[in-house]
Image (spheres, rainbow, N blue to C red):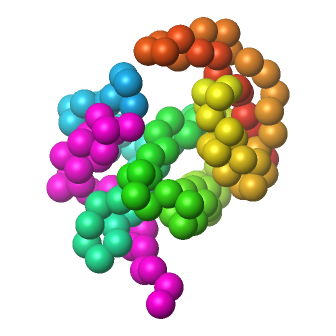
Amino acid sequence: MTPFFEIAPMQPGDVQAAAALEAQIFTMPWSEDSFRSALRSSDTLYLSVKENRRFIGYCGFWQSFDEADITNVAVCESCRGRGVGYQMLHELMRLGRERGVLRYTLEVRTGNAAAVHLYEKLGFVSVGIRKNFYERPREDALIMWTE
């Protein structure tokens, strides 16, 4: 049986689960207030992913004219390797095109090979490095773009 992922715009009721997942994955996580603020902006689009009503991931971007910066991508550890990240980012980019987004950018830790591979599958290419972009641990970021 193929798993069913429900991908939909993030709702205020998803904020607590998003912040909890963020805290499990990232060393400098966004707070619930950060997610609430992002959801209030007309320049953002955030999606949540649920499997059998269980919150398993999210992603989002900040839009500026015809470009968007993908700011958050997270999938719970037990659900990785099942295509959740690809499906939710594909949907995010599809919805972005409907909003007029032509180009996407993001930063990813240079050591995060799985994420880099995922982004390359979605058409992103590496265009540079941001030195010491990340803290805890300090690491460079790979700058990636797609059109």
Residue 7 drawn above or below residue 67: below
Residue at 47 percent across and 39 percent down: it is 72
State which region is magenta: 1-25
Q: Is residue 55 magenta?
A: no
- Measuring 80% from the left and 33% from the top, which residue is drawn there? 126
Residue 13 visible in the snapshot: yes
Residue at the farthest front position: 78
Q: Nearer the viewer, residue 95 or 51?
A: 51
Q: Where in the figure is residue 134, as x and y percent of width and height?
A: 53, 16
| Residue 137 x %, y % | 48, 15
Give 62 or 143, whichever is nearer the viewer.
143
Q: Quadrant of residue 103?
A: top right
Asked if residue 4 is among those painted magenta in the image, a careful observer would answer: yes
Q: Quadrant of residue 131?
A: top right
Q: Is residue 108 left or right of residue 7?
A: right
Q: Nearer the viewer, residue 20 or 81?
A: 81
Residue 13 located left or right of residue 84 = left
Q: Position of residue 113 (x, y in %)?
A: 68, 39
Residue at far bottom of view: 1
Q: Position of residue 108 (x, y in %)?
A: 61, 31
